[in-house]
Amino acid sequence: MKILILNGPNLNLIGRREPHIYGTESLVNYIENLKQCFPEHKLDYFQSNHEGVLIDKLHEAWDLYDGVVFNPGAYCHTSIALADAIRSIEIPVVEVHISDIYSREEYRHHSFTAEASVKSIVGNGLEGYKEAVGFLIRN
């Protein structure tokens, strides 16, 4: 199975950014370790701080991947365009959030992209990515 792990804005700073919320392990390091957990599957990683680039990657994923693990970051709360992009492709997308968005500021409680995704995993730290990959493989 080929899976794209796609991350949105500010997630390139995980490991340094707000370690009390996101921890101290870099996401790039975690993804490399994650690949070792699923050696029989191809996991590709991409991150962008730009909404249009993320939309383009979702469109491209339709022809290249069997599923997407997507952490849209703060865009989940604002981007109907990303939600529409998820709905537009015919491969499953699992949304992941490292922190529990529902126990944070009220403006973070609604996710447009979760509504479009087949599953949403929140608050499990970086292990949420592993849970999402496992879900895609099993389903």
Image: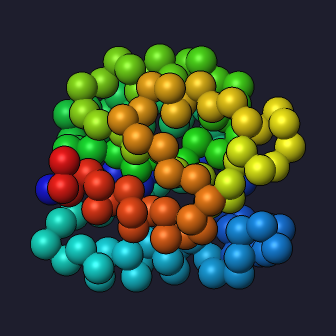
Closer to the camera, 91 or 134?
A: 134
28 is higher (above) or lower (below) than 99:
below
Left/right of residue 124 with respect to residue 6 in the rendered view: right
- Point out the image quarter for the N terminus: bottom left
> Quarter of the image holding residue 102?
top right
> Quarter of the image holding residue 5?
bottom left
Q: Residue at x 52, y 33 (%)?
A: 114
Residue 31: image location, x then y, percent? 44, 72
Residue 23: image location, x then y, percent? 71, 76
Left/right of residue 37 with respect to residue 73 in the rendered view: left
Residue 11 appears anywhere in the view: no
121 is higher (above) or lower (below) than 123:
above
Q: Residue at x 84, y 36 (%)?
A: 106
Q: How many marks?
A: 0
Closer to the camera, 122 or 43?
A: 122
Q: Residue at x 36, y 35 (%)?
A: 118
Q: Residue at x 40, y 82 (%)?
A: 33
Residue at the far front: name it: 103
**Colour basis:** rainbow
Left/right of residue 12 with respect to residue 4 in the rendered view: right
Residue 67: image location, x then y, percent? 27, 44
105 is higher (above) or lower (below) than 12:
above
Left/right of residue 72 with respect to residue 70 in the rendered view: right
Residue 74 appears anywhere in the view: yes
